[in-house]
């Protein structure tokens, strides 16, 4: 049984979606988190080292950070094919897009949100526009990041793009908008929304 440490309307929400897609047995443990406005507090029941979400526990094994959780869960529950396993020809692309999410895309959004120019040549990430262009180029090969089939990487990217679709952090892109809609139109996303509050 997977325990998902969750706070509503945060990055942990997409893991309800992923767990539903995987058909994995899970429970949701609601936790408090520190909020941007200074309210809230880290929950001592949350195993994430900084009291953030998401984090999961699987029979005593704790995993935190979105790409690590996505990889762990798709390796642990491979039956629905949401993550190519070691040895599969798409494994390298899958790992790359998971790493790109936390190493490039999220820092790009944070830089833009904070109005910090990304230092050329020294930062490990790029401006949001350049990151989005790379994703659009990848999506020119198929409806999802790995081509014709949904992967857990799409759950990370698609839900993020759906959340930012009306934000000034991201320029309008018909390709990205259609992609995000494809991802959130899935029945597992609707089931996850119904469980958002635990």
Image (cartoon, rainbow, N blue to C red):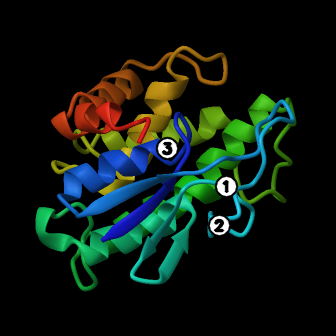
| Percent x, y of residue 146 | 27, 55
Marks 2/3: CA distance?
A: 31 Å
| Percent x, y of residue 85 | 25, 78
Q: Which residue is mark 3?
A: 134
Q: Which residue is mark 2?
A: 48
Marks 2/1: CA distance?
A: 6 Å
Bin the neighbour count of mark 2 within 10 Å (Cα to Cα): few under 14, some 14-19, many 20 and up. Answer: some
Residue drawn at x 82%, y 35% as measured from the top left: 39
156 or 129: which is nearer to us?
A: 156
Placement of 10 over or under 73, stated as above or below: above
Placement of 91 over or under 35, stated as above or below: below
19 or 140: which is nearer to us?
A: 19
Question: Are the residues at dot 2 and dot 1 in contact (C-beta closer than 8 Å)?
Answer: yes
Compared across the picture, whether 97 is left or right of 187 comes to right
166 or 14: which is nearer to us?
A: 14
87 or 2: which is nearer to us?
A: 2
Compared across the picture, whether 29 is left or right of 153 comes to right
Bin the neighbour count of mark 1 within 10 Å (Cα to Cα): few under 14, some 14-19, many 20 and up. Answer: many
| Percent x, y of residue 142 | 22, 42
Marks 1/3: CA distance?
A: 28 Å
Q: Which residue is mark 1?
A: 52
Placement of 14 over or under 172, stated as above or below: below
Comparing labels 2 and 3, the label whose residue is closer to the camera? 2
Secondary element at image label 3: helix
């Amino acid at each position: 049984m997977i325990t998902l440490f969750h706070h509503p309307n945060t990055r942990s929400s997409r893991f309800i979606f992923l767990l539903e897609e995987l058909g994995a047995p899970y429970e949701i443990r609601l936790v408090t988190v520190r909020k941007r406005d200074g309210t809230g507090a880290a929950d001592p029941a949350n195993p994430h080292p900084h009291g953030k979400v998401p984090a999961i526990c699987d029979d005593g094994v704790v995993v935190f950070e979105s790409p690590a959780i996505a990889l762990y869960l798709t390796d642990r529950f491979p039956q629905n094919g949401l993550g190519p396993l070691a040895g599969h020809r798409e494994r390298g692309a899958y790992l790359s897009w998971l790493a790109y999410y936390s190493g490039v895309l999220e820092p790009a959004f944070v830089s833009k949100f904070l109005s910090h120019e990304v230092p050329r040549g020294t930062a490990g990430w790029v401006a949001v526009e350049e990151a989005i262009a790379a994703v659009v180029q990848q999506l020119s090969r198929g409806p999802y990041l790995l081509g014709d089939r949904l992967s857990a990487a799409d759950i990370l990217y698609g839900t993020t793009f759906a959340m930012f679709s009306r934000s000034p952090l991201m320029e309008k892109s018909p390709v990205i908008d259609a992609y995000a809609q494809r991802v959130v139109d899935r029945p597992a996303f609707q089931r996850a929304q119904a469980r958002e509050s635990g």
